[in-house]
Structures are given as structure tokens and as C-alpha cells.
């Protein structure tokens, strides 16, 4: 009975989430996917979580319920820059400060043809109550969709669940996606520390100028500062 249930559980996990099951030695796995979390469930059977997309990949697509209705991500936002941000939980103190900052910067982001999309494992109902509370407390409104991902499927697809931080809630992940729907930058922060939204704006403008003028931007670059020409620079050169 126990083994039958275990088999059913494994079957359910594989087909309802973005997990891969691999019959392999952990050392071999680590060679291929050094940054993936590995979770052993039997002697020779290992489950590891998808690491999520990497820079240059097409943004994985999914359909999701949000505070603004159903969306097909990322296709619905093609032609805009997209910033997809996960947060651990609605109503918590750090997340509240983050969403108040997002509400503050959103009009500037919209002028730069940039779409914000939030995500957590909370329900749309909870998101809406929290959104109403935030909007009542501030003159700047939270006026971008927040995805509800109660089973964490999208979170696993994007590598937003870091099991040693929380097995259920997302960390503070940020994905920059370009108008052609390619991933251009990724960063993850732990639950305990809020993101710097001035840096998020700065990186958006840096990515946009790199795309427009084929330039790179030096350390601490800010709009108006000198850029670095990328003419003749190839990224796939073997070192000597
Ligand atoms: C917060 O947003 O305050 C928070 C959320 C999850 C864990 C720790 C802090």
C-alpha cells in the first residue's frame, strides 16, 4: 500500500509540475546542472527541480489567472519590455514596501514601454484584497497584473522556488524580458531583503540602450553616462 501510494505520488509530481526525474548519480547531475537543487527520495532515484530559464533563452510561456484576468505570458506583452517579479507572500512587511515602490515607479516604467507583472503563490482573491489595502494607503496605485500561482507550477518553471529558503513560497525573483520575449537579465533575492527599485530602473534603461545602440554599459552606469561600443566584439570567443 505504502509503495503504491509512493508511486502515485511520484507520478503526480512528475506530471503536475516541472520536475524531472533522473536515474543518475548525483555527481553526474551536478556536472550538468551545478546550480539546481537536488532532492533525493530513494537510493537511486533523484528528483531535481528545473533551474528556470537563463539569459538568452525564450521566456517560457504559460497561461495564468491574475488580478486583471487570464493572461497568456509572455505573448500578451510582446513588443514591450517585461519585468516579471515574484514575492514570497501577500500582506508581509517587506513585500508591502516592495509593492509600494513598484506603484511609485510604474508610471515611469510605462513611459519606457515596460510592463510589470507580479507573482506569488497566493490566490487572486488574496491578491485583490491586498491590492485594495495598498491602494487605500497610498496615492500611487498598484495597477499591473499579479499572477496567482497556488500550486507553484509557474514558480518552478521559472526557478523561483529555492527549496532551502522555502519549499512553498517563491523567493524575490526578477526577470527582465525583451520585446522579442527573450530573457535578458535575472536576479534572485531572499525573502528577508527587499529589492532596490532604483537598480531595477537603471538595469532596464541599460538593457534598452544596449539593445538600441549595440553598446555595453560600465559599472555604476546611469542614463546620460558614457557607454562602451560593442562593435566587433563577439561573445563566443574561446580563451587562449
Ligand atoms: C516579508 O515580506 O516581510 C517576508 C516574507 C516572507 C518571509 C520573510 C519576510
Image (cartoon, rainbow, N blue to C red):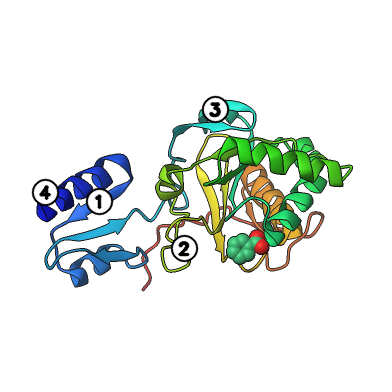
Helix, strand or loop for disc 1: strand
Residue at mark 2? 166
Residue located 76% across and 36% down the image: 110
Horizontal side of 229 relative to 139 (left or right) equals left
Whether disc 4's CB lies below 8 Å from ligand 1 is answered no
Which of the image's four quarters has the C terminus? bottom left
Circle 2/circle 1 CB separation < 8 Å? no
Q: Gap between marks 4 and 2, in whole Å?
A: 28 Å
Residue at mark 3? 71
4 vs 1, front mark? 4
Q: Position of residue 165 (x, y in %)?
A: 48, 67
Numbered disc total? 4
Q: Gap between marks 4 and 1, in whole Å?
A: 20 Å
Question: How packed is label 4: few (under 14 Cα within 10 Å), some, or many (20 or more)?
Answer: few
Helix, strand or loop for disc 2: loop
Tell me the quadrant of ligand 1: bottom right
Residue located 42% across and 44% down the image: 151
Position of 93 relative to 149 (above/below) = below
Q: Earlier in the sequence, mark 4 or mark 2?
A: 4
Q: Earlier in the sequence, mark 3 or mark 1?
A: 1
Residue 116 visible: no
Give me the disc on residue 164: none
Q: Earlier in the sequence, mark 3 or mark 4?
A: 4
Give me the disc on residue 20: 1
Helix, strand or loop for disc 4: helix
4 vs 2, front mark? 4
Residue at mark 4? 4
2 vs 3, front mark? 2
Q: Gap between marks 3 and 4, in whole Å?
A: 38 Å
Quadrant in the picture for residue 81:
top right
Amino acid at each position: 500500500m505504502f509503495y503504491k501510494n509512493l508511486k502515485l505520488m511520484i507520478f503526480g509530481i512528475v506530471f503536475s509540475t516541472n520536475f524531472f526525474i533522473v536515474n543518475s548519480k548525483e555527481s553526474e547531475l551536478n556536472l550538468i546542472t551545478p546550480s539546481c537543487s537536488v532532492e533525493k527520495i530513494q537510493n537511486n532515484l533523484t528528483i531535481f527541480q528545473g533551474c528556470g530559464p537563463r539569459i538568452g533563452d525564450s521566456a517560457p510561456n504559460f497561461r495564468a489567472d491574475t488580478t486583471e484576468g487570464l493572461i497568456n505570458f509572455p505573448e500578451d506583452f510582446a513588443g514591450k519590455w517585461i519585468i516579471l517579479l515574484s514575492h514570497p507572500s501577500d500582506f508581509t512587511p517587506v513585500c508591502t514596501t516592495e509593492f509600494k515602490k513598484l506603484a511609485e515607479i510604474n508610471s515611469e516604467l510605462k513611459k519606457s514601454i515596460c510592463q510589470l507583472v507580479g507573482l506569488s503563490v497566493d490566490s487572486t482573491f488574496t491578491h485583490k484584497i491586498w491590492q485594495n489595502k495598498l491602494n487605500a494607503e497610498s496615492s500611487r496605485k498598484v495597477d499591473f497584473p499579479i499572477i496567482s500561482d497556488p500550486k507553484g507550477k509557474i514558480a518552478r518553471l521559472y526557478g523561483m522556488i529555492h527549496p532551502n529558503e522555502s519549499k512553498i513560497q517563491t523567493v524575490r525573483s526578477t526577470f527582465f524580458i525583451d520585446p522579442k520575449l527573450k530573457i535578458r537579465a535575472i536576479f534572485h533575492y531572499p525573502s528577508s531583503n527587499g529589492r532596490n527599485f532604483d537598480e531595477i530602473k537603471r538595469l532596464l534603461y541599460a538593457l534598452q540602450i544596449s539593445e538600441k545602440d549595440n553598446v555595453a554599459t560600465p559599472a555604476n552606469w546611469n542614463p546620460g553616462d558614457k557607454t562602451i561600443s560593442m562593435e566587433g566584439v563577439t561573445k563566443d570567443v574561446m580563451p587562449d
